Amino acid sequence: MKNRLKVLRAERDWSQADLADKLEVSRQSVNAIETGKYDPSLPLAFKIAAIFGLPIEQIFSADESAQAAE
Amino acid sequence: MEREKTSLAAKRYSRDMLIAGALYAGVVIGGALTLNQEPPQWAVVVIALLPMLPALLMLRAYLVFLKGMDEFQRQIQSEAVAIAAGVTGFGSFSYGFLEEWAGFPHLPLIWVLPTLIFSWGVALCIVRLRYK
């Protein structure tokens, strides 16, 4: 899954640690999500969406390869 | 805020492990000294099982620490535990066949848990590196 977390975070001038605090997760978790190494659970994805005030699909999108396979 | 919570959980984990470790050392040393007095067989069995109590305290400390982690950290832990269980399980199973069929020297079962803990530590480093 791809995501716009890094861009959205930069727009708000939040560090990874700031976002981690808001999400109540570790900074390593935010980093792993941002770099696409870890896909968050649905509850965490909803929490991320709520914090940014955006629908989930404006933050996360399926990989192009995954979309092509569909 | 979250950082404070994480460090508090880590501190509690270290404290609980330290206490359990001290108890373990006390029970093992005390047990070895008591065995020198040649106690009855039933007492030897009880003494032999006593180190399990502090060992279970260590397991409890780990489970409490695990419960306090976020979902990503828990995934890392479960992958590391799965790798360690695989290495230890298949390692001891393979060595069992080598002992039985190929005459390899007998290794005591007491080494199974330390092997599991050691391989968990190594697996944890590898899994963490993979997610970096």
Image: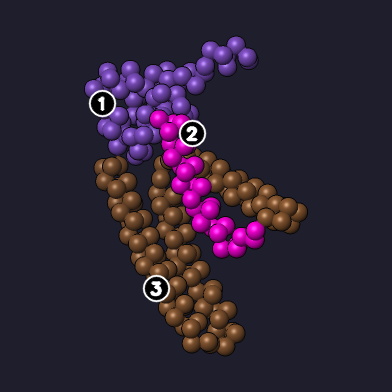
**Closer to the eye: label 3 or 1:** 3
- Residue A14, disc: 1
Front-lying residue, B51 or B109:
B109
Per the model, the C-alpha gap separating discs 2 and 3 is: 44 Å
Per the model, the C-alpha gap separating discs 3 and 1 is: 49 Å
Q: The residue tagged with tag 1: helix, strand or loop?
A: loop
The answer for which chain carries disc 2 is A
Residue B47 within the segment the image draws in magenta: no
Chain A tint as drawn: purple
- Mark before the other along the chain sequence, 1 or 2: 1
Q: Label 2, on which residue?
A: A41
Q: Amino acid type of disc 2?
A: Ser
Q: Specify the segment rendered in magenta.
A: B105-132
Residue at 32%, 60% (x, y): give it: B15
Mark 2 and mark 3, same subunit? no
Q: Tell me the quarter of the image containing the N terminus of chain B.
A: top left
The percent position of residue B81, horizontal first and vertical second, equals 53, 46
Q: Label 3, on which residue?
A: B26
